[in-house]
Image (cartoon, grey):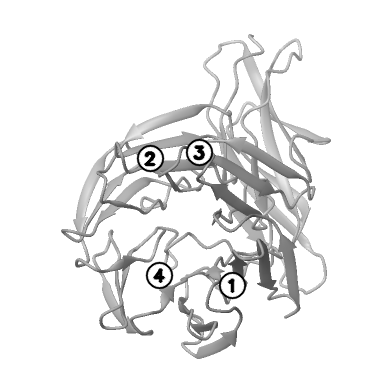
Amino acid sequence: MAKSLKPQIVILFTVLLSWSTAASAASVTLAWNAVSDSTVTGYELCWGEAPGRWPTCKTVGNVTESPVTGLIDGRAYYFVVKAYNAAGTRSEPSTEVSRRLGVPHATVGDLTGDSRTDLGVYRPSEGNWYFKNAWTSAQSRIRWGISSDIPVAADYDGDGRIDTAVYRPSDGTWYLINSSTGVGTTLGWGIPEDRPAPGDYDGDGKADAAVFRPSQGVWYMRLSTTGTPRGVQWGIATDKPVPADYDGDGITDVAVFRPSVGTWYLVKSTSGAGWSGGWGVAGDVPVPADYDGDGKSDIAVFRPANGTWYLRLSSTGAGFAFQWGIGTDLPVPGDYDGDGKADIAVFRPSVGTWYVRYTATGGTVALQWGLPGDIPVVK
């Protein structure tokens, strides 16, 4: 058996076994593709609580799916699988996948909770939100906001669905409608110059109100677990905030893209260490998302000048380029087919049409939903 042969692993689902507020046992079921080598006699699952470190292993035999039990809610785990032969020789580990267990995991732009990104737009001229489920064609309209508001939809209540929300720069106020209750709430958090940057900065499965203040290069978050504020100095005035979970621990990492030099600057929450890397040029639009399904956001840009997406996959470090879009399109990556991987997609304001390239099948689709002037919910 060649050690270079590697299975590819995915997390099928996680199961919370106890809703106790104390640490409790949880399990996760993983599946992987069979290695095309007749000498393979079985597989070994390994895991740990830090990227690249898997101290605990178990052999599962010649199967391609297995549960891992005895894990702890609220902790992030990293998994790999290895193939072995009759002599006990192990292959190289698979791509690492990760998940924080026992907390909700909402799909970006998913209003209905089916783990698929929905078509959604905010119409500033009306203050209305319009949603359409691309699979069922179910439609809904929600009135929430005024023309100067910035849409900041995210899962603020931890029910696995995005909440309708806007940030009002004129007074630094967030206006939310919790999808779990239908009740509206307000929160003062920011000043007119701030750029909203919501994310789950404390890993509790709920999005936190947060802003990036260009004049100071400081991030201000209000953590949902405690209601306490947190400030992080990271960035300069011309940077674009690109918060995402780049290390796969279920916590949003503070990050910026610097267009002037095409460089990304990240602070990884697993270690607190900073990282920087070049990926992009001036004029690119940053579009971080998990394109390879390993639980980590990938660095990526959309280049309006040639309608091309440039992705740097966290699973392999490899770069890819896909031509999908034109110069006036707005990139809207999301998991539209529910396979756990972000799909390349654009919204064309001139015709109100979404163009999606599905990762599950490689198929493409054009879906009309929106009008000129609408702002897509997914960004």
Mark 3 or 4: in front is: 3
User: Disc 3 versus disc 2: distance between alpha carbons?
Assistant: 9 Å
**Tag 3's secondary structure?**
loop
Q: State the residue position of label 2.
A: 359
User: Disc 4 versus disc 2: distance between alpha carbons?
Assistant: 21 Å
User: Disc 3 versus disc 4: distance between alpha carbons?
Assistant: 24 Å
Judge left or right: residue 256 versus residue 282: right
- Give percent across and percent down for residue 89: 74, 13
Q: State the residue position of label 4.
A: 112
Contact, CB < 8 Å: mark 4 with mark 2? no
- In which quadrant of the rendered view does residue 101 lie? bottom right
User: How busy is the neighbourhood of tag 3: few (under 14 within 10 Å), some, or many (20 plus)?
Assistant: many
- Give percent across and percent down for residue 181: 50, 87
Q: Mark 1 or mark 4, which has the lower sequence index?
A: 4
Q: State the residue position of label 3.
A: 292
- Give percent across and percent down for residue 175: 49, 84
Q: Amino acid at mark 1?
A: Gly
**Tag 4's secondary structure?**
loop
Measured along the vertical axis of the image, is residue 178 above or below residue 353? below
Q: Amino acid at mark 4?
A: Thr
Q: State the residue position of label 1.
A: 158
- Give percent across and percent down for residue 33: 52, 29
Residue at image point 33% right, 37% down: 361
Quadrant containing the N terminus in the rendered view:
top right
Q: Amino acid at mark 2?
A: Thr
